[in-house]
Image (cartoon, rainbow, N blue to C red):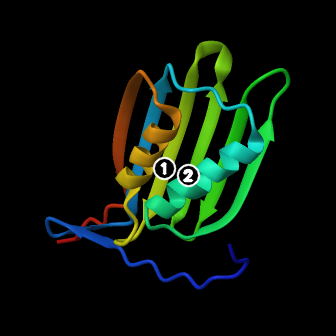
């Protein structure tokens, strides 16, 4: 990881529309429990790398008695994980900007790491440019 980078994200084009990026909101139910901040950091960096994103900084926090929040700040935006082990639930956000990052690849990596029994997914196209006529 590096501390300084130049922003070089190009907006994505889809069906004659431009947009900033894709935001995936995933809910994992019945996932493997991970209570280690070191393991969470490793998973976040792996998700970023698998998506073709550029990780800038990772931060995690372990709650008492259980649960972890972790986020990896990307040159292309962020990936975050919030765990509630008492409900066997993970809340995951993957927001990537530009035309190079592949957020679904990050999601696939997270599925492999956490092996959830059930996944709920929402996809939001962020920053759609509306042409004025």
| Residue 123 quadrant | top left
Query: Does residue 21 lie above or below 42 as drawn?
Result: below
Query: Does residue 27 lie above or below 65 as drawn?
Result: below
Percent across and percent down for residue 29 are 48, 21
- The residue pinned by badge 1 equals 94
Q: Residues within 10 Å of mark 1 (few under 14, many from 20)?
A: many
Identify the element where label 2 is drawn: strand
Looking at this rendering, what residue extends furthest in the top direction? 86
Query: Does residue 132 lie above or below 65 as drawn?
Result: below
Percent across and percent down for residue 58 are 71, 57
Q: Which mark is residue 118?
A: none
Percent across and percent down for residue 89 are 56, 22
For the N terminus, the image quarter is bottom right
Name the one closer to the observer, 56 or 49: 49
| Residue 101 quadrant | bottom left
Q: How many marks?
A: 2
For the C terminus, the image quarter is bottom left
Q: Residues within 10 Å of mark 2 (few under 14, many from 20)?
A: many
Percent across and percent down for residue 54 are 55, 70
For the point 63% across and 26% down, the residue is: 33
Residue 116 placement, left or right of 40: left
Identify the element where label 1 is drawn: strand
For the point 38% across and 78% down, the residue is: 10
Residue 4 placement, left or right of 29: right
For the point 54% across and 62% down, the residue is: 77
- The residue pinned by badge 2 equals 79
| Residue 118 quadrant | top left
Kindly report the distance in space between the C-alpha atoms of the residues bearing marks 2 and 1: 4 Å
Residue 12 placement, left or right of 115: left
For the point 50% across and 19% down, the residue is: 30
- Tag 2 near tag 1, CB within 8 Å: yes
Return the disc, 2 or 1, that comes first in the chain's sequence: 2
């Amino acid at each position: 990881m590096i501390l300084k980078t130049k922003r070089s994200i190009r907006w994505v084009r889809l069906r004659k529309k431009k947009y900033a990026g894709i935001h995936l909101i995933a809910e994992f139910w019945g996932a493997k429990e991970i209570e280690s901040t070191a393991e969470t950091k490793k998973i976040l960096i792996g998700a970023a790398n698998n998506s073709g994103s550029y990780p800038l900084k990772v931060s995690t926090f372990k709650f008492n008695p259980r649960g972890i929040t972790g986020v990896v700040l990307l040159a292309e935006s962020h990936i975050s994980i919030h765990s509630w082990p008492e409900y066997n639930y993970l809340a995951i956000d993957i927001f990537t900007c530009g035309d190079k990052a592949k957020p679904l690849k990050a999601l696939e990596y997270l599925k492999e790491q956490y092996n959830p029994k059930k996944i709920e997914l929402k996809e939001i196209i962020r920053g759609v440019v509306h042409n004025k006529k």
